Image: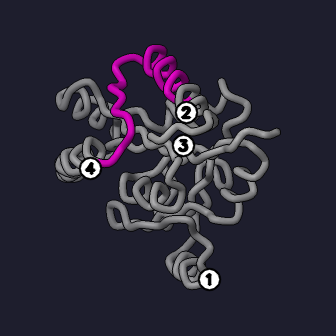
Amino acid sequence: MARAAFPIVLSAPSGAGKTTLANLLIKNMSDVKLSISYTTRKKRGSERENIDYFFVDDAKFDAMIAQNLFLEWAKVHSCMYGSPLKETNETLNSACDVLFDIDVQGGIKIKEAFPKALLIFICAPSWIELENRLRKRGTESDEIISKRLFAAQQELKIGVKSYDYILSNKTLNNSLFELTRIVHTHRILNSAPNIIY
């Protein structure tokens, strides 16, 4: 009998290393598949269509909302993001967990739709380190960085209150080990009979 698959949500402030950890987890666990989000924002750097995101315009995104094609969607930093519903259900039905690299608003919506979803909030080891990481990217102005740091405080409050785990991303190797351990533990809890958690 195939195990019951579940959504895995990784959320974090910009610069905390969420996307890097998500990609490493996918490489290390063959039975976890990344959900590719739709977004109305422009491509950054080396991002690729259909691999990092599905890049669409506002009209296309609005049409998808009207057709109930998203599991969850939200406006983040003035751009729209959404997770596809059909692909999520198909992957879960194939006994493969679905990994979402999304914001906290989306994470809470997924938990409402899938109560056994695993929500993990990733943060930098300190606010100074988070600011340093944002500045090293060299893609945003001081004003945008200040906005992102303010948003990070609000996201952390939601993460602490609503997420299952908080993971400090000090080093990638240790964080990946902890992340993998958390997923395996959740699988045990999710498959064990007569356990309420």
Mark positioned earlier in the residue sequence (4 or 2): 4
Name the colouring of the figure: one colour
Estimate the x, y position of residue 43 in percent, counting from the top left: 52, 55
Q: Which residue is mark 3?
A: 8
Three-letter amino acid code at the position of disc 1: Gln
Identify which amino acid the numbered label 3 is placed on: Ile
- Image position of 135 (left or right of 72): left
Q: Quick check: 35 above or below 182?
A: below
Q: Looking at the image, which is closer to me, 3 or 39? A: 3
Query: 153 or 146: which is nearer to us?
Result: 153
Q: From the top left corner, tell me how far across and down residue 157 is, in percent.
A: 21, 46
> Which one is earlier in the sequence, the residue at label 3 or at label 4?
3
Task: Identify the residue at image location x=34%, y=37%.
Answer: 15
User: Which residue: 37% across, 59% down?
Assistant: 105
Q: Earlier in the sequence, mark 1 or mark 3?
A: 3
Please give the residue where the numbered disc 1 appears in the rendered image. 67
- Return the mark for residue 189: 2
